[in-house]
Amino acid sequence: MSLGPIPSGKSVTTSAAELRPVTALKGVGDALATKLAKLGVETVQDLLFLLPLRYEDRTQIIPIGALRSGDRAVVEGEVQLAELVFRRRRQLLVRITDGSGFLTLRFFYFTAQQQAQLTRGVRLRCYGEARRGSLGLEIVHPEYRRADGPDAQRTEDSLTPVYPTTEGVQQGRLRILTALALDDAEQQRVRDWLPSDLLRDLGLPSLAEALTYVHRPPPGADLMPLAMGTHPAQRRLAFEELLAHQISLRLLRQQIRTEPAWPLVSAGQLVMQFRQALPFSLTQAQERTLSEAIKDIGTTSPMLRLVQGDVGSGKTVVAALTALVAIEAGYQVAMMAPTELLAEQHWQNFESWFKPLRLPVALLSGKLTGTARQKTLNAIASGVDVPLVIGTHALFQEGVRFNRLALVIIDEQHRFGVQQRMALREKGMKEGRVPHQLIMTATPIPRTLAMTAYADLDVSVIDELPPGRTPVSTVVLPETRRDTVVARIAAACREGRQAYWVCPLIEESDELDYQAAEATHAALVSALPSLQVGLVHGRLTSKKKEAMMASFKRGELNLLVATTVIEVGVDVPNASLMVIENAERMGLAQLHQLRGRVGRGAAESTCVLLYRAPLSRLAQERLDVMRSTTDGFKVSERDLELRGPGELLGTRQTGLVQMKVAELIRDADLLPRVQKAAEQLISHHPESIRPLLRRWIGNGEQYGQV
């Protein structure tokens, strides 16, 4: 699937520089072009948007006597001595002086031609990082050129950019090629696709000015804003990049909306029976979200709805009720989970819920093989025996055929990419119609991020917890207080409560000093002889894991020692104490998910975060956040600030992590204007869209190709 048609309007005209292959530049043959393609450089324009990672100041020559260890600088001097030495490996040592001091140039890799050129009396201009060596200050493998030619007095007239590189393409070559591309752009006039009135309102420089500045900052330019990405030239490019990503998602949404879906309308008998059997009433937030979903699937326009809700807010019940509408209307539903464990737990929940309604539920995961797998595939293909299928990414693999798939439910959206979501949707395409999509996440996404990452989705928020859920208090303790924590577990279990003890690894590791689950389990069995202590981790078979978790849920175990396999899906209302070992090593989202395993009943619950000193500043901030709030949205806001959008969403989510210039936190203030600009371009300047997407996203594979 592509991004779909561009809104009708004027024909697109693209400048010569934007279409010309990079081989049009002097010195670029097919071999170099192949290497440049690894950097995403295929056209002359691509070179302009291969932006520097940082800058070096080579505009001044520094006296050798003024050099300090750690300085990166340009020096000039005359060769006093050049000798070949053998100290564990062959080296060429060249000593230069400028009258203020001496400096050694050390080469481990060199040619006979280089050795012949670097002789006594030759004057060199060098650049590199000075380090303290056995012979005093030295530079290992400096960049250098002879300084006794006709341009000996010339220094660089701009800061020197440092570009991302690939094997076979050195910095010097990239700088030359970028300079050629900038000259080419001046002659060919690379087009600014943003309307002039929009640029005027933003108060940002033109594209040509921005590109010239970021590739060749003038001498004396302030490196601080450039390093932070806040210079107006960078902001101009960041705005355009965010705009391209915003438009691409909107076009994806438009494309999907143009394809008809099955209108799912039922008499509501299954929904009524299911609701009557529930031991609780839905919250207002659940009712609102359910109403929005049912309204969406009742039309011929495919639903694209994201349901955000904190751990334990009841998203799965809303998904189950929505699925029942589709099933009663005579269609199939598929639910995709990111891990086999979570898929199995969803299957157990749905099977127990749907059994009284006489609705079979199938589980399709990678573990299912042979005859059992084929039997399940046949049942899914028939559509009669299996109205609901739950599985992992195995759901959209080759060989899986649905009969009348009309609704796709995706759990833990941030762990899937858009491509995977689209692939499952393609599985349901039949008779020209596509399935509705209901997407759930227990990782609340801050509004700032959602505006960009989920521009193709409508968003529902379940922002209240079911009645009876009590807030979890969080305590942060050093591991030296372990005995106190063990005593607390003993007291809680004597009162009839249960507890979790979470460890990051399964067994002792020489490389990592984590407390391993097996060692912790043995220690706790010894320390708490009167308690039943279970152990569950990812290396157990599914049967053993399920048996252990079921035993814990039935109350046969007092304490469950586990790895992070229990991060999602385990619901034990009687568990009121959670201990997390090595909490300083975990991210906020994972800590919050784990904490959500307790506080699911009426009893007061506590999460104890054990850490090993000393704490890094980042770890300290994370633990402070966990101690100060249980609000998932506040946690995610801080997580976004501390880790960035890539980790919060998952690197495969939307390509945000691959942005060349923009950063969502830093550039958040641009987003409202980005949204308005996207509307303006789609409505009034459709001719600008394709070239803009080509410039920043390539051909848009990240957002729609499957």
Image (spheres, rainbow, N blue to C red):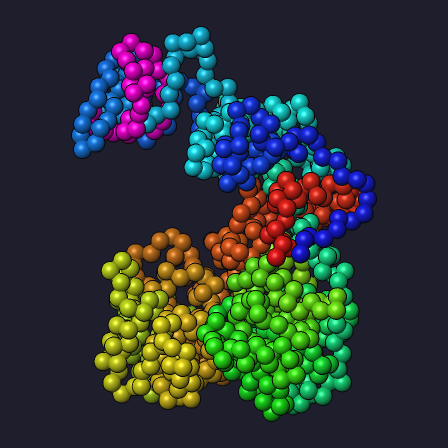
Q: Is residue 438 magenta?
A: no
Q: Residue at x 47, y 76 (%)?
A: 369
Lateral position of residue 407 relative to residue 312, left or right: right
Query: Between residues 299 and 568, which one lies in front from this camera angle?
Result: 299
Q: Is residue 112 magenta?
A: yes
Q: Which residues are magenta?
A: 107-135
Q: Residue at x 35, y 15 (%)?
A: 124
Residue 266 drawn above or below residue 456: below
In the picture, residue 533 is in which quadrant?
bottom left
Lateral position of residue 134 relative to residue 151, left or right: left
Report the number of numbered marks: 0
Rendered-image quadrant of the N terminus: bottom right
Q: Position of residue 8 (x, y in %)?
A: 81, 47
Q: Position of residue 360 (x, y in %)?
A: 59, 85
Residue 174 drawn above or below residue 646: above
Residue 499 drawn above or below residue 233: below
Residue 289 can be seen, yes or no = no
Q: Position of residue 70 (x, y in %)?
A: 32, 31
Q: Position of residue 565 (x, y in %)?
A: 41, 72
Query: Between residues 326 and 61, which one lies in front from this camera angle?
Result: 326
Residue 331 can be seen, yes or no = yes
Q: Residue at x 27, y 58 (%)?
A: 511
In the picture, residue 184 is in which quadrant?
top right
